[in-house]
Amino acid sequence: MPKIRVMPTLLFKDVGLVKGVAFDSWRRVGSAMQAVKVYNMREVDELVYLDITATGDGRPPDFETVDDLADECFMPLTVGGGVRTVEDVRRLLKVGADKVAINTAAVERPALIREIADRFGSQCVVVSIDARRRADGTYESYTHSGRVPVGKDPAAVAKDAEAMGAGEVLLTSIDRDGTMRGYDVELTRLVADAVSIPVIASGGAGTYQHMVEVLREGRASAVAAASIYHFTEQTPLAAKRFLRERGFPVRL
Amino acid sequence: MKRVAVVDYGMGNLDSVARALEECGGRPVVTDRAEDIGSATHIVLPGVGAFGDGIRNVRQRGLDQILREQAVIGGIPFLGICLGMQMLATRGHEGGVTEGLGWIDGEVRRLEPAGEDSRIPHIGWNEVVLARPSALLAGVEPGRDFYFVHSYHLVCHDKEDVLAMTPYCGGFVSAIARGNIFGVQFHPEKSQRLGFQVLRNFLAL
Protein backbone atom coordinates (compact mmCIF):
# COMPACT_ATOMS: atom_id res chain seq x y z
CA MET A 1 0.00 0.00 0.00
CA PRO A 2 1.17 3.51 -0.65
CA LYS A 3 1.35 5.53 2.53
CA ILE A 4 -1.42 7.80 3.68
CA ARG A 5 -0.43 11.27 2.57
CA VAL A 6 -0.67 14.25 4.89
CA MET A 7 -0.66 17.38 2.76
CA PRO A 8 -0.62 21.03 3.77
CA THR A 9 -2.67 23.27 1.48
CA LEU A 10 -1.45 26.75 0.61
CA LEU A 11 -4.03 29.22 -0.66
CA PHE A 12 -2.67 32.18 -2.55
CA LYS A 13 -4.61 35.43 -2.94
CA ASP A 14 -3.26 38.73 -4.22
CA VAL A 15 0.21 38.87 -2.70
CA GLY A 16 0.42 36.12 -0.13
CA LEU A 17 -1.10 33.14 1.55
CA VAL A 18 -4.52 33.34 3.12
CA LYS A 19 -6.92 31.10 4.98
CA GLY A 20 -10.63 31.67 5.33
CA VAL A 21 -13.78 30.05 6.62
CA ALA A 22 -16.25 28.51 4.17
CA PHE A 23 -14.36 30.07 1.23
CA ASP A 24 -14.76 33.55 2.76
CA SER A 25 -13.38 35.84 5.50
CA TRP A 26 -9.79 35.50 4.36
CA ARG A 27 -6.96 36.08 6.84
CA ARG A 28 -3.39 36.60 5.77
CA VAL A 29 -1.08 33.82 6.90
CA GLY A 30 2.29 34.77 5.47
CA SER A 31 4.41 34.38 2.39
CA ALA A 32 4.21 31.44 0.03
CA MET A 33 7.97 31.15 -0.35
CA GLN A 34 8.49 31.02 3.40
CA ALA A 35 5.86 28.30 3.74
CA VAL A 36 7.34 26.23 0.92
CA LYS A 37 10.81 26.44 2.47
CA VAL A 38 9.55 25.41 5.89
CA TYR A 39 7.51 22.51 4.57
CA ASN A 40 10.40 21.42 2.40
CA MET A 41 12.70 21.38 5.40
CA ARG A 42 10.14 19.39 7.37
CA GLU A 43 9.83 16.89 4.51
CA VAL A 44 6.06 16.90 4.23
CA ASP A 45 4.53 14.29 1.92
CA GLU A 46 3.17 16.68 -0.66
CA LEU A 47 2.07 20.29 -1.06
CA VAL A 48 -1.06 21.74 -2.64
CA TYR A 49 -0.82 25.32 -3.86
CA LEU A 50 -4.03 26.97 -5.07
CA ASP A 51 -4.29 30.46 -6.52
CA ILE A 52 -7.86 31.11 -5.45
CA THR A 53 -8.51 34.33 -7.35
CA ALA A 54 -7.06 33.46 -10.76
CA THR A 55 -10.30 32.14 -12.27
CA GLY A 56 -12.41 34.94 -10.77
CA ASP A 57 -10.00 37.54 -12.13
CA GLY A 58 -9.92 35.81 -15.51
CA ARG A 59 -6.14 35.34 -15.28
CA PRO A 60 -3.97 32.37 -16.19
CA PRO A 61 -1.77 30.80 -13.50
CA ASP A 62 1.18 32.91 -12.36
CA PHE A 63 3.88 30.78 -13.94
CA GLU A 64 6.76 32.87 -12.61
CA THR A 65 5.67 32.53 -9.00
CA VAL A 66 5.15 28.80 -9.39
CA ASP A 67 8.60 28.56 -10.97
CA ASP A 68 10.18 30.30 -7.97
CA LEU A 69 8.28 28.17 -5.45
CA ALA A 70 8.99 24.92 -7.26
CA ASP A 71 12.71 25.68 -7.23
CA GLU A 72 12.61 25.30 -3.43
CA CYS A 73 10.19 22.42 -3.38
CA PHE A 74 11.82 18.97 -3.50
CA MET A 75 8.56 17.26 -2.72
CA PRO A 76 5.52 16.70 -4.90
CA LEU A 77 3.68 19.89 -5.72
CA THR A 78 0.12 20.20 -6.98
CA VAL A 79 -0.76 23.58 -8.46
CA GLY A 80 -4.24 24.88 -9.17
CA GLY A 81 -6.10 28.07 -9.97
CA GLY A 82 -6.81 29.55 -13.38
CA VAL A 83 -5.83 26.44 -15.35
CA ARG A 84 -7.92 26.44 -18.54
CA THR A 85 -5.84 24.96 -21.35
CA VAL A 86 -3.42 22.17 -22.16
CA GLU A 87 -0.81 24.87 -22.70
CA ASP A 88 -1.34 26.13 -19.12
CA VAL A 89 -0.68 22.60 -17.91
CA ARG A 90 2.41 22.18 -20.07
CA ARG A 91 3.88 25.40 -18.71
CA LEU A 92 3.08 24.54 -15.08
CA LEU A 93 4.68 21.11 -15.39
CA LYS A 94 7.65 22.64 -17.11
CA VAL A 95 8.33 25.13 -14.30
CA GLY A 96 8.13 22.42 -11.66
CA ALA A 97 4.55 21.48 -10.81
CA ASP A 98 4.05 17.73 -10.59
CA LYS A 99 0.30 17.74 -10.80
CA VAL A 100 -2.23 20.29 -11.86
CA ALA A 101 -5.58 20.81 -10.17
CA ILE A 102 -8.52 21.93 -12.28
CA ASN A 103 -11.95 22.86 -11.01
CA THR A 104 -13.95 25.37 -13.04
CA ALA A 105 -12.48 24.43 -16.43
CA ALA A 106 -13.02 20.70 -15.74
CA VAL A 107 -16.73 21.28 -15.23
CA GLU A 108 -17.19 23.77 -18.06
CA ARG A 109 -15.30 21.65 -20.56
CA PRO A 110 -14.75 18.08 -19.31
CA ALA A 111 -12.87 17.19 -22.53
CA LEU A 112 -10.00 19.26 -21.15
CA ILE A 113 -9.37 16.46 -18.64
CA ARG A 114 -9.04 13.99 -21.50
CA GLU A 115 -6.74 16.28 -23.45
CA ILE A 116 -4.43 16.75 -20.47
CA ALA A 117 -4.45 13.04 -19.59
CA ASP A 118 -3.68 12.03 -23.17
CA ARG A 119 -0.79 14.43 -23.39
CA PHE A 120 0.76 14.25 -19.92
CA GLY A 121 -0.80 11.17 -18.34
CA SER A 122 -3.70 10.77 -15.93
CA GLN A 123 -1.42 10.93 -12.94
CA CYS A 124 -0.92 14.66 -13.27
CA VAL A 125 -4.59 15.62 -13.53
CA VAL A 126 -6.19 16.36 -10.19
CA VAL A 127 -9.83 17.30 -10.46
CA SER A 128 -10.70 19.60 -7.62
CA ILE A 129 -14.32 19.42 -6.49
CA ASP A 130 -15.78 21.90 -4.04
CA ALA A 131 -19.05 20.75 -2.50
CA ARG A 132 -21.70 22.04 -0.15
CA ARG A 133 -24.43 20.12 1.60
CA ARG A 134 -27.97 20.90 0.44
CA ALA A 135 -30.86 21.29 2.90
CA ASP A 136 -32.13 17.82 1.98
CA GLY A 137 -28.81 16.22 2.91
CA THR A 138 -27.59 15.67 -0.66
CA TYR A 139 -24.59 17.56 -2.06
CA GLU A 140 -24.03 20.20 -4.72
CA SER A 141 -20.76 20.83 -6.56
CA TYR A 142 -19.43 24.35 -7.10
CA THR A 143 -17.00 26.12 -9.40
CA HIS A 144 -15.44 29.61 -9.31
CA SER A 145 -14.12 29.22 -5.75
CA GLY A 146 -17.46 28.07 -4.40
CA ARG A 147 -19.60 30.73 -6.02
CA VAL A 148 -21.29 28.96 -8.94
CA PRO A 149 -23.37 25.79 -8.42
CA VAL A 150 -22.93 23.10 -11.06
CA GLY A 151 -26.24 21.31 -10.67
CA LYS A 152 -24.57 17.94 -10.11
CA ASP A 153 -23.62 16.02 -7.04
CA PRO A 154 -19.89 15.62 -6.38
CA ALA A 155 -19.93 11.82 -6.80
CA ALA A 156 -21.26 12.29 -10.34
CA VAL A 157 -18.69 14.98 -11.12
CA ALA A 158 -15.94 12.71 -9.80
CA LYS A 159 -17.17 9.71 -11.79
CA ASP A 160 -17.29 11.75 -15.01
CA ALA A 161 -13.83 13.14 -14.30
CA GLU A 162 -12.47 9.65 -13.75
CA ALA A 163 -14.01 8.47 -17.02
CA MET A 164 -12.31 11.40 -18.77
CA GLY A 165 -8.95 10.34 -17.36
CA ALA A 166 -8.52 12.27 -14.10
CA GLY A 167 -5.91 10.71 -11.84
CA GLU A 168 -7.04 12.01 -8.51
CA VAL A 169 -9.80 13.97 -6.82
CA LEU A 170 -9.21 16.81 -4.39
CA LEU A 171 -12.51 17.03 -2.55
CA THR A 172 -13.22 20.06 -0.42
CA SER A 173 -16.23 20.60 1.81
CA ILE A 174 -17.06 24.30 1.60
CA ASP A 175 -19.22 24.02 4.73
CA ARG A 176 -16.35 22.64 6.79
CA ASP A 177 -13.57 24.71 5.22
CA GLY A 178 -11.70 26.65 7.88
CA THR A 179 -14.05 25.59 10.67
CA MET A 180 -11.72 22.97 12.14
CA ARG A 181 -14.84 20.99 13.11
CA GLY A 182 -13.81 17.90 11.19
CA TYR A 183 -13.95 16.69 7.60
CA ASP A 184 -17.28 15.94 5.95
CA VAL A 185 -16.85 12.19 6.24
CA GLU A 186 -20.12 11.35 4.52
CA LEU A 187 -19.27 13.50 1.50
CA THR A 188 -15.84 11.93 1.26
CA ARG A 189 -17.23 8.41 1.49
CA LEU A 190 -19.79 9.15 -1.25
CA VAL A 191 -17.08 10.25 -3.64
CA ALA A 192 -14.46 7.65 -2.63
CA ASP A 193 -17.02 4.88 -3.19
CA ALA A 194 -17.97 6.28 -6.60
CA VAL A 195 -14.45 6.21 -8.08
CA SER A 196 -11.38 4.01 -8.06
CA ILE A 197 -8.86 6.85 -8.24
CA PRO A 198 -7.45 8.31 -5.01
CA VAL A 199 -9.50 10.91 -3.17
CA ILE A 200 -7.82 13.65 -1.12
CA ALA A 201 -10.12 14.86 1.65
CA SER A 202 -10.03 18.57 2.37
CA GLY A 203 -11.89 21.05 4.54
CA GLY A 204 -12.46 20.95 8.27
CA ALA A 205 -9.43 19.32 9.86
CA GLY A 206 -9.00 20.60 13.40
CA THR A 207 -7.49 17.59 15.13
CA TYR A 208 -5.55 14.49 14.16
CA GLN A 209 -8.58 12.43 15.14
CA HIS A 210 -10.52 14.15 12.34
CA MET A 211 -7.97 12.71 9.93
CA VAL A 212 -8.45 9.24 11.35
CA GLU A 213 -12.21 9.54 10.81
CA VAL A 214 -12.06 10.64 7.18
CA LEU A 215 -9.42 8.02 6.34
CA ARG A 216 -11.27 5.20 8.06
CA GLU A 217 -14.94 6.07 7.47
CA GLY A 218 -14.51 8.30 4.44
CA ARG A 219 -12.04 5.99 2.64
CA ALA A 220 -9.80 8.92 1.66
CA SER A 221 -6.28 8.23 0.38
CA ALA A 222 -4.85 11.49 1.66
CA VAL A 223 -5.72 14.31 4.02
CA ALA A 224 -5.23 17.92 3.03
CA ALA A 225 -5.45 20.66 5.62
CA ALA A 226 -4.55 24.29 6.15
CA SER A 227 -6.02 25.99 9.23
CA ILE A 228 -4.82 23.28 11.58
CA TYR A 229 -1.23 24.05 10.54
CA HIS A 230 -1.62 27.83 10.26
CA PHE A 231 -3.56 28.48 13.47
CA THR A 232 -2.65 25.69 15.89
CA GLU A 233 0.52 24.04 17.12
CA GLN A 234 -0.30 20.85 15.26
CA THR A 235 2.07 19.71 12.50
CA PRO A 236 2.04 17.26 9.58
CA LEU A 237 4.74 15.20 11.29
CA ALA A 238 2.79 14.87 14.54
CA ALA A 239 -0.30 14.02 12.49
CA LYS A 240 1.56 11.13 10.87
CA ARG A 241 2.83 9.86 14.21
CA PHE A 242 -0.74 9.92 15.49
CA LEU A 243 -1.95 8.06 12.39
CA ARG A 244 0.78 5.46 12.70
CA GLU A 245 -0.15 4.73 16.29
CA ARG A 246 -3.66 4.02 15.03
CA GLY A 247 -2.50 1.56 12.44
CA PHE A 248 -2.30 3.67 9.28
CA PRO A 249 0.71 3.29 7.00
CA VAL A 250 2.57 6.60 6.93
CA ARG A 251 6.02 7.74 5.89
CA LEU A 252 8.10 8.90 8.83
CA MET B 1 32.03 19.01 -12.02
CA LYS B 2 29.56 16.46 -13.36
CA ARG B 3 27.94 17.77 -16.51
CA VAL B 4 24.49 16.22 -16.70
CA ALA B 5 22.37 16.32 -19.82
CA VAL B 6 18.71 16.40 -18.76
CA VAL B 7 17.09 15.30 -21.98
CA ASP B 8 14.33 17.63 -23.17
CA TYR B 9 11.84 15.89 -25.42
CA GLY B 10 9.06 18.36 -24.73
CA MET B 11 7.54 16.43 -21.87
CA GLY B 12 8.16 16.08 -18.21
CA ASN B 13 9.19 17.97 -15.14
CA LEU B 14 12.53 19.05 -16.54
CA ASP B 15 13.01 21.95 -14.15
CA SER B 16 12.41 19.83 -11.07
CA VAL B 17 14.91 17.24 -12.20
CA ALA B 18 17.50 19.86 -13.10
CA ARG B 19 17.05 21.69 -9.78
CA ALA B 20 17.45 18.49 -7.79
CA LEU B 21 20.61 17.54 -9.71
CA GLU B 22 21.99 20.99 -9.03
CA GLU B 23 21.27 20.60 -5.30
CA CYS B 24 23.12 17.29 -5.44
CA GLY B 25 26.24 18.89 -6.84
CA GLY B 26 25.78 18.27 -10.56
CA ARG B 27 25.77 20.80 -13.37
CA PRO B 28 22.57 20.05 -15.29
CA VAL B 29 21.82 21.26 -18.79
CA VAL B 30 18.25 20.86 -20.00
CA THR B 31 18.77 20.12 -23.66
CA ASP B 32 17.68 18.35 -26.83
CA ARG B 33 20.92 19.15 -28.67
CA ALA B 34 23.15 16.29 -29.76
CA GLU B 35 26.32 18.24 -28.92
CA ASP B 36 25.20 18.78 -25.28
CA ILE B 37 24.28 15.14 -24.89
CA GLY B 38 27.50 14.15 -26.64
CA SER B 39 29.65 16.15 -24.23
CA ALA B 40 27.83 15.19 -21.00
CA THR B 41 29.36 13.02 -18.30
CA HIS B 42 25.91 11.78 -17.23
CA ILE B 43 22.54 11.58 -18.95
CA VAL B 44 19.12 11.78 -17.29
CA LEU B 45 15.95 11.01 -19.23
CA PRO B 46 13.06 12.34 -17.15
CA GLY B 47 9.45 11.91 -18.04
CA VAL B 48 5.89 12.52 -17.13
CA GLY B 49 3.31 11.53 -19.68
CA ALA B 50 2.09 8.89 -22.04
CA PHE B 51 4.40 6.26 -23.55
CA GLY B 52 3.40 6.77 -27.20
CA ASP B 53 3.81 10.54 -27.10
CA GLY B 54 7.10 10.21 -25.27
CA ILE B 55 8.64 7.85 -27.81
CA ARG B 56 7.34 9.87 -30.74
CA ASN B 57 8.85 13.05 -29.32
CA VAL B 58 12.17 11.35 -28.65
CA ARG B 59 12.32 9.99 -32.23
CA GLN B 60 11.10 13.20 -33.87
CA ARG B 61 13.97 15.07 -32.26
CA GLY B 62 16.38 12.37 -33.36
CA LEU B 63 17.34 11.77 -29.73
CA ASP B 64 17.13 7.96 -29.85
CA GLN B 65 20.28 7.86 -31.98
CA ILE B 66 22.48 10.08 -29.82
CA LEU B 67 21.23 8.51 -26.60
CA ARG B 68 22.07 5.05 -27.90
CA GLU B 69 25.51 6.18 -29.03
CA GLN B 70 26.32 7.74 -25.67
CA ALA B 71 24.68 5.37 -23.22
CA VAL B 72 24.49 1.95 -24.87
CA ILE B 73 27.65 2.13 -26.96
CA GLY B 74 29.62 4.82 -25.11
CA GLY B 75 28.82 3.53 -21.62
CA ILE B 76 28.06 6.90 -20.05
CA PRO B 77 26.01 6.67 -16.83
CA PHE B 78 22.35 6.95 -17.78
CA LEU B 79 19.29 7.33 -15.55
CA GLY B 80 15.71 7.10 -16.78
CA ILE B 81 13.07 8.42 -14.41
CA CYS B 82 9.44 7.22 -14.51
CA LEU B 83 8.39 7.42 -18.19
CA GLY B 84 12.10 7.90 -18.93
CA MET B 85 12.69 4.41 -17.55
CA GLN B 86 9.63 2.89 -19.19
CA MET B 87 10.67 4.11 -22.63
CA LEU B 88 13.78 1.91 -22.44
CA ALA B 89 11.56 -1.16 -22.79
CA THR B 90 10.97 -3.17 -25.95
CA ARG B 91 7.42 -1.90 -26.22
CA GLY B 92 4.63 -0.12 -24.38
CA HIS B 93 0.91 -0.85 -24.18
CA GLU B 94 -0.36 2.61 -23.26
CA GLY B 95 -2.90 3.83 -25.82
CA GLY B 96 -2.05 1.12 -28.38
CA VAL B 97 1.21 -0.74 -28.82
CA THR B 98 4.32 1.40 -29.40
CA GLU B 99 7.87 0.22 -29.91
CA GLY B 100 10.17 1.50 -27.17
CA LEU B 101 13.88 2.23 -27.31
CA GLY B 102 14.50 -1.47 -26.75
CA TRP B 103 17.48 -1.19 -24.41
CA ILE B 104 15.77 -3.27 -21.74
CA ASP B 105 13.99 -6.46 -22.63
CA GLY B 106 10.49 -5.89 -21.34
CA GLU B 107 7.04 -4.39 -21.76
CA VAL B 108 5.19 -1.50 -20.18
CA ARG B 109 1.75 -2.49 -18.99
CA ARG B 110 -1.04 -0.92 -16.99
CA LEU B 111 -1.09 -1.62 -13.27
CA GLU B 112 -3.92 -3.99 -12.44
CA PRO B 113 -5.66 -3.49 -9.10
CA ALA B 114 -5.10 -6.30 -6.61
CA GLY B 115 -7.62 -5.94 -3.83
CA GLU B 116 -10.18 -3.28 -3.08
CA ASP B 117 -7.81 -0.63 -1.95
CA SER B 118 -5.30 -0.59 -4.79
CA ARG B 119 -6.35 2.61 -6.41
CA ILE B 120 -4.79 3.53 -9.75
CA PRO B 121 -2.90 5.74 -10.56
CA HIS B 122 -0.45 4.65 -7.88
CA ILE B 123 0.20 8.01 -6.26
CA GLY B 124 2.19 8.62 -3.14
CA TRP B 125 4.99 7.26 -1.02
CA ASN B 126 5.73 3.60 -1.15
CA GLU B 127 8.45 1.16 -0.25
CA VAL B 128 11.36 0.22 -2.46
CA VAL B 129 12.62 -3.28 -1.70
CA LEU B 130 16.06 -4.05 -3.08
CA ALA B 131 16.38 -7.17 -5.21
CA ARG B 132 20.16 -6.90 -5.29
CA PRO B 133 22.83 -4.45 -4.17
CA SER B 134 23.75 -1.63 -6.54
CA ALA B 135 25.73 1.57 -6.65
CA LEU B 136 22.58 3.52 -7.48
CA LEU B 137 20.66 2.54 -4.36
CA ALA B 138 23.65 2.32 -2.02
CA GLY B 139 22.86 3.67 1.42
CA VAL B 140 19.10 3.26 0.97
CA GLU B 141 17.90 1.30 3.97
CA PRO B 142 15.42 -1.50 3.27
CA GLY B 143 11.78 -0.52 3.18
CA ARG B 144 12.26 3.23 2.88
CA ASP B 145 9.68 5.24 0.95
CA PHE B 146 9.99 7.03 -2.35
CA TYR B 147 7.45 9.11 -4.24
CA PHE B 148 5.54 7.44 -7.06
CA VAL B 149 2.99 8.75 -9.50
CA HIS B 150 2.15 6.41 -12.38
CA SER B 151 -0.46 4.08 -13.88
CA TYR B 152 1.88 1.89 -15.94
CA HIS B 153 4.83 -0.24 -14.94
CA LEU B 154 7.76 -1.98 -16.57
CA VAL B 155 7.62 -5.76 -16.75
CA CYS B 156 11.20 -7.02 -17.16
CA HIS B 157 11.70 -10.19 -19.17
CA ASP B 158 15.21 -10.58 -17.83
CA LYS B 159 15.09 -10.76 -14.04
CA GLU B 160 18.77 -9.80 -13.95
CA ASP B 161 17.73 -6.26 -14.87
CA VAL B 162 15.59 -5.84 -11.74
CA LEU B 163 17.18 -3.75 -9.01
CA ALA B 164 14.18 -3.19 -6.75
CA MET B 165 10.49 -3.99 -6.40
CA THR B 166 7.59 -2.17 -4.78
CA PRO B 167 4.73 -4.04 -3.10
CA TYR B 168 1.65 -2.72 -4.89
CA CYS B 169 -0.75 -4.35 -7.34
CA GLY B 170 0.99 -7.67 -6.80
CA GLY B 171 4.45 -6.05 -6.89
CA PHE B 172 6.07 -4.08 -9.68
CA VAL B 173 9.60 -3.21 -10.75
CA SER B 174 10.63 0.10 -9.19
CA ALA B 175 14.30 0.19 -10.23
CA ILE B 176 16.37 -1.44 -12.95
CA ALA B 177 20.00 -1.63 -13.98
CA ARG B 178 21.88 -3.06 -16.91
CA GLY B 179 25.52 -2.05 -16.73
CA ASN B 180 25.71 1.73 -16.83
CA ILE B 181 22.00 2.05 -17.63
CA PHE B 182 19.70 2.70 -14.69
CA GLY B 183 16.03 3.40 -14.36
CA VAL B 184 13.70 4.24 -11.49
CA GLN B 185 9.92 4.25 -11.50
CA PHE B 186 9.82 6.62 -8.53
CA HIS B 187 10.77 10.28 -8.62
CA PRO B 188 14.09 10.84 -6.83
CA GLU B 189 13.79 14.57 -7.55
CA LYS B 190 10.63 14.62 -5.43
CA SER B 191 11.65 12.13 -2.78
CA GLN B 192 13.52 14.63 -0.64
CA ARG B 193 16.58 13.47 1.32
CA LEU B 194 16.43 9.86 0.19
CA GLY B 195 15.84 10.84 -3.42
CA PHE B 196 18.88 13.10 -3.27
CA GLN B 197 20.90 10.17 -1.96
CA VAL B 198 20.02 8.26 -5.13
CA LEU B 199 20.89 11.21 -7.36
CA ARG B 200 24.21 11.69 -5.55
CA ASN B 201 24.94 7.99 -6.01
CA PHE B 202 24.21 8.37 -9.71
CA LEU B 203 26.42 11.45 -10.05
CA ALA B 204 29.24 9.55 -8.32
CA LEU B 205 29.22 6.88 -11.04
Image: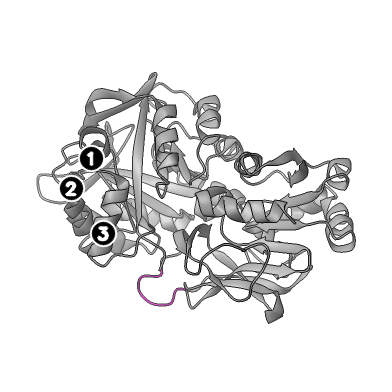
Task: Check the image and report above or below for B194 versus A33.
Answer: below
Q: Tell me the subunit letter for badge 2.
A: A
Residue B75 against residue A111 in the figure, above or below: below
Q: Does the stretch in magenta take in B50?
A: no
Q: Is residue B174 above or below residue A63?
A: below
**Within-10-Å neighbours for mark 3: few <14, some 14–19, many 20+:** many
For the stretch drawn in magenta, the main secondary structure is: loop
| Residues in magenta, as a range | B113-118
Q: Position of residue B53 (x, y in %)?
A: 69, 54
Q: What colour scheme was applied to this rendering of the protein?
A: one colour
Query: Do residues under tags 3 and 2 come within 8 Å of each other at their CB atoms?
Result: no
Left or right position of A16 against B59 = left
Nearer to me, A93 or A158: A93
Q: Amino acid at mark 1?
A: Ile
Quick one: label 2 or label 1, which is nearer the N terminus? 2
Question: Gap in Å between the C-alphas at discs 3 and 2?
Answer: 11 Å
Compute the Cα span from label 1 to label 3. Answer: 16 Å
> Which label number is shown at residue A207?
2
Q: Nearer the viewer, residue B138 or A13?
A: B138
Q: Are marks 2 and 1 on the same chain?
A: yes
Judge whether residue A52 can be spotted in this image.
no
Q: Residue at x 40, y 21 (%)?
A: A57
Q: Quadrant of residue A131?
A: top left
In the image, residue A178 lies at what x, y percent? 20, 36
Q: Secondary structure at mark 3?
A: helix
Which mark is drawn over residue A228?
A: 1
In the picture, measured across the screen, residue A49 lies left or right of residue A70, that is left
- Residue B114 belongs to magenta span: yes
Residue in the image at 24% along x and 57% along y: A242
Q: Which residue is mark 3?
A: A243
